[in-house]
Image (cartoon, rainbow, N blue to C red):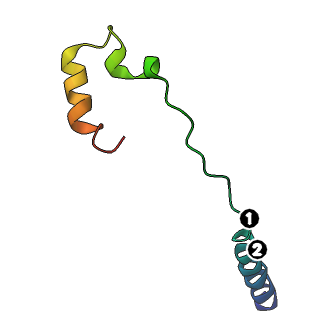
Amino acid sequence: MKRYIKPILYAVLALAVVAQLFRPERTNPPVSAELDLRADPHVRKEVLSILQRACFDCH
């Protein structure tokens, strides 16, 4: 059993190193204003107020 652990750990380490060579493309797509919750007339003011306090500082 022990003789299988070292090669598996080396393989996982090699995969982790190789994975660092491939980077995903980082793009920020344009934001559509009509998808903003603040532009939606169906969102109540109370809900919008809670969202602004809880979420809009990070998102």
Q: Which residue is found at the position 40% from the left and 23% from the top?
A: 36
Residue 34 in the image: state x and y as whole percent. 45, 17
Q: Is residue 27 above or below residue 56?
A: below
- Please tell me in which quadrant of the rendered image residue 35 appears: top left
The answer to whether marks 1 and 2 mark residues whose Cβ atoms lie closer than 8 Å is: yes
Relative to 57, 32 lies left or right: right
Estimate how packed mark 1 is, as few (under 14), some (14 to 19) or many (20 or more) residues with alpha carbons within 10 Å: few
Give 24 or 18, whichever is nearer the viewer: 24
Q: Is residue 44 above or below residue 55?
A: above
Location of mark 1 (residue)? 22
Relative to 44, 6 lies left or right: right
Relative to 6, 38 lies left or right: left
Give 16 or 5, whichever is nearer the viewer: 16
- Please tell me in which quadrant of the rendered image residue 29 appears: top right
Give 41 or 4, whichever is nearer the viewer: 41
Nearest to the eye among marks 1 and 2: give it: 1
Give 20 or 8, whichever is nearer the viewer: 20
Residue type (three-letter) at the residue carrying disc 2 = Val
Estimate how packed mark 2 is, as few (under 14), some (14 to 19) or many (20 or more) residues with alpha carbons within 10 Å: few
SS at circle 1: loop
Q: Which residue is found at the position 37% from the left and 40% from the top?
A: 59
Q: CA distance from mark 1 to mark 2?
A: 7 Å
Label for residue 18? 2
